Amino acid sequence: MDDSRISRHGSGARLWLAGGWLLLALLAAIFAPLVAPQDPLAQDLMFERLPPFWMSGAEPGFWLGTDSLGRDLLSRLIFGARIAFVVAFAAALAACLVGSTLGLIAGYFGGWADRIISRIVDVWMAFPPVLFAILLVAVLGTGLSSVIIAIAVIDWTRFCRVIRAETMGQARMDYVENARIAGYGRIGIMLREVLPNVVPSIVALLSLEMGIAVIVEAILSFVNLSISTDDPTWGGIIAEGRLSIHQAWWVLVFPLVTLILTVLSFSQFGEGLKARFDPVLR
Amino acid sequence: MNASACLDISNLSAVLPNGARVLRSVSLSVQPGEVRALVGESGAGKTMIGKAVLGVLSPSVRIVEGDMLLEGEDLGRLQPKARRTLIGARTALIPQDPLTALNPSRRIGPQMTDRLVRILGWSGQRADVRIRQLLDEVQIRDPNRVLKCYPHELSGGMRQRVLIAAAFAAEPRLIVADEPTTALDVTVQKQILRLIAQLQREHGTAILFVTHDLGVVAKISQKVSVLYAGKVVEEAETAALFAAPQHPYTRALMAATPRYTDPFASLKPVDEAVLAGLAAEIAAADQAWRRPHG
């Protein structure tokens, strides 16, 4: 009894902290032109490598300092969040749709459907993910949609494996047998009886996957393979910051902290949601 | 063969992929409104017979011969879809474990009415009235609360009551009760058993009652089949069986049942000589069976 109360409380705090950060970042991304204090692309060599606001030599209006071309770091991070969130949502949803569907089919029907899907997953997971992504983007060409497709193509296996295992566990339950005795069709049972019980896992994975998509997008833009325009991306800012780390550490550190907080929030948000909405854990 | 029987199983044999026989020419029948107990140790095949009747045998178990007639309809001859419909309309299961037999993510109410509405085509209102009536029969006093609950919010005994209500709701002709009291608290077991017996009498439903508990057999059934290693070793009227068990295994099983009158006596296993005799009997039967079946 006490245990459940503690874990529930814990999941509540976790859910609110992570959700709060994500909401903040999401709102900043949506309203970037309104909230960003500067134009993220405006260069000004008079203001190059300004430190963040609490250090001597800081200028008002450039809260987190500027990079080596005099561009405002905070504004670049806010605009970078746009790409990060678009990629996170689109790629995670696509991976989820493909992976969960295949996982549900493999887990519920078993037999040859399971064997074929599982072998494909095995082969897929033998590819090193980041190299695979780079290869895919190289083939598809750079651009937002290529990044999204690449991430979805790589990471659907995560959904497939977990949902397959969950579905297998649920399919063995007596309530599924009961539904079969009552005369429901196989697909009806899969969608109406089994699917609702794996939804909490799908939601948790979806959130986790959004964080992973943010990382992969950052890696791709770090190696300059993400989008080809001038729009700031977190990975791109990190790559630039790496070059001037001795003169302006903040250009590396702030985007890294933002990235880590966002990824962590996505995974914690998912776990918190699962704990809250899983009727058995609840 | 008995055309008027509610369930008539004749000569049913099933094998595993490795060729091992798990059901050995089982014959039994359940008359309308009658409770037939199927008693035996774990692994004797009691549950498997129930599952075979309900059409949910695990795919690795293959039925190699025998017929199952549900109200005169040969289940083996029907197309899968027609068989599903027939089984769905005429039978129900009271499962062993009420914890996993209800869908954890759906509320009790929709879960219970769903079957009546979707499978039997009742109106939502009719189904709702029916479910409330049944909940009353299983002595659930606050149906409004229970119908809104998720399964995990109810105790094991309450869930079993819900499942009993659900089983009787569509007025099936045959209910398979698969050790319905085993997973419950001892104090709850008695109530649940009484409830099943009461509803069975009122609704006149035939029950194939699977159990390993001879005490339960004596309380609830009119006829008994004693099963060992997938073979019916003895069948009789319940009263006659307890008065004068014929087969040595039945006698040994009765002797092995612990008594309340002597709680400190150590548990007696079934006599080894009896088991050796049974093993020989089964080996001989298998030999005879294999000859024509290859």
Image (cartoon, coloured by chain):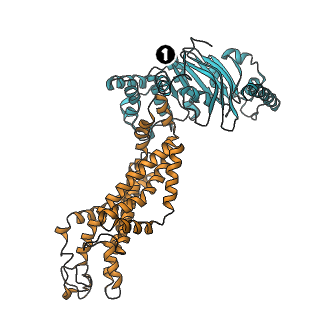
> Image quarter for residue B123?
top left
User: What residue is drawn where x is 73% and y is 27%?
Assistant: B253
Q: Colour of chain B?
A: cyan
Residue A212 makes an appearance in the image:
yes
* Residue tagged 1: B202
User: What residue is drawn where x is 23% and y is 63%?
Assistant: A27
> Image quarter for residue B206?
top right
Q: Position of residue B182 (x, y in %)?
A: 59, 33
Residue A2 makes an appearance in the image:
no
Chain letter for the part of the structure drawn in orange = A
Q: Which residue extends farthest left?
A: A34
Tell me which chain the residue with mark 1 is part of.
Answer: B
Q: Position of residue A181 (x, y in %)?
A: 49, 29
Quarter that holds the C terminus of chain B: top right
Pick whichever, B170 or B131, lies toward us.
B170
Which structural element holds mark 1?
A: helix
